[in-house]
Image (spheres, helix red, strand yellow):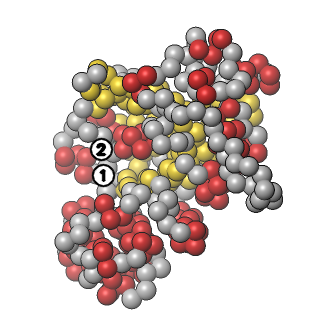
Amino acid sequence: MTDKLIDVENLTLQFKTDEGLVTAVDDVSFHVAPGEVLGLVGESGSGKSVTAKSLMKLNPGNAVYGDDSKITLHADGNAVNIFDLKSDEEMKLIRGGAISLIFQEPMASFAPAITIGDQMVEQLVLHKNISEKEAKDISIEMLERVGISDAPTRFGQFSFELSGGMRQRAMIAMALSTRPKLLIADEPTTALDVTIQAQVIELMKDLVKEFGMGIIFITHDLGVIAQTADRVAVMYLGKLVEQGPVRDVIRDPVHPYTQGLLNALPKLEDLNAPLTPVPGDIPSPLERPNGCVFHTRCDRAEPRCSEAVPQQMQYVENHVGACFVTAEQRGAT
């Protein structure tokens, strides 16, 4: 896992609104290697989904990307800057081809008046230039691979005829049928009960091993990330505040926000322990704080935290965080 599959550099994204430009993502950089799972975590409003959609240029027309923003996809021996792709034909190579996206709610992804099978066949014919019969065979095979019983029957059904877990599996099957290099999973287990959630997580692990694809797994649940990801990137109000190997980040978090997310998890070893939420609420992007964006909710904040933006500092190999106080206490490099 040494080569980069996708490399995101200095990604900044703003939206044009009646109130002016609103910053949703601020100078974010990360990469994903083939066969690697990167967990992207943070509360709602942290910028996780708009960051992921940027990789496929799926944000709405009022999105404005920074001049220094660069997203490079390395596939089939070529390096492509996604922002250089302009036409729909060029973007077709990325959207559903090299990169596939699984949404949080499968009912919003499947057209209710078209069968699951017809939707799978349509996208395969579009991206793979194969016959409808070949597309049907591939679709049924993929439905079977994700654990859907009686796949030929399910192929001819509508999304509302399937259970929540089965719809989620069908959506994963559709996303994987084009053999993407990168799979973006946007909170794919949030709406599922814990049993189905565990099955979906195991399925995604198996698919990474089988196809060697990279995965960006978006969630607010660090417990899920601990079971799924190789590395984790923590976002808050459009900034990456911490990034590193998942075990290092969970066992020894360096940013107060990451520590707050971990403290908010229920403790199975002490069921009587009270839950400890991160204090306050995430600010509106229209009222973005100066300095460190987390200082308004941080119990360790100092005057300098509201005046200057902390830079990413390294603590152990590949484990970085952006916090003045931690850097001073631990002597980061």
Residue 13 in sight in this render: yes
Q: Position of residue 302 (x, y in %)?
A: 69, 15
Examine the rendered structure and indicate whether residue 236 appears above or below residue 153: above
Name the amino acid, label 2: Leu
**Mark 2 surroundings: few (<14), some (14-19) or many (≥20) residues within 10 A:** few
Return the residue nearer the eye: 102 or 36.
102
Residue 146 versus residue 311 in the image, above or below:
below
| Callouts 2 and 1 close, C-beta under 8 Å | yes
Instruction: Using the rendered view, name the quadrant where residue 262 is placed.
Output: top right
Which one is in front, 195 or 30?
A: 195
Could you tell me residue 36's position as x and y percent? 56, 53
Residue 130 visible in the shown view: no
Type of the residue with mark 1: Arg
Given residues 15 and 215, the one toward you in this image is: 15
Q: Using the image as rendered, state which of residue 250 and residue 284 is in the foreground.
A: 284
270 relative position to 206: left or right: right
**Mark number, residue 95:** 1
Q: Earlier in the sequence, mark 2 or mark 1?
A: 2
Residue underneath mark 2: 58
Q: How many marks?
A: 2
Quote the CA–CA distance across marks 2 and 1.
9 Å
**Residue at x 58% of width, y 41% of height:** 233
Where is residue 248? Give x, y as percent: 73, 43
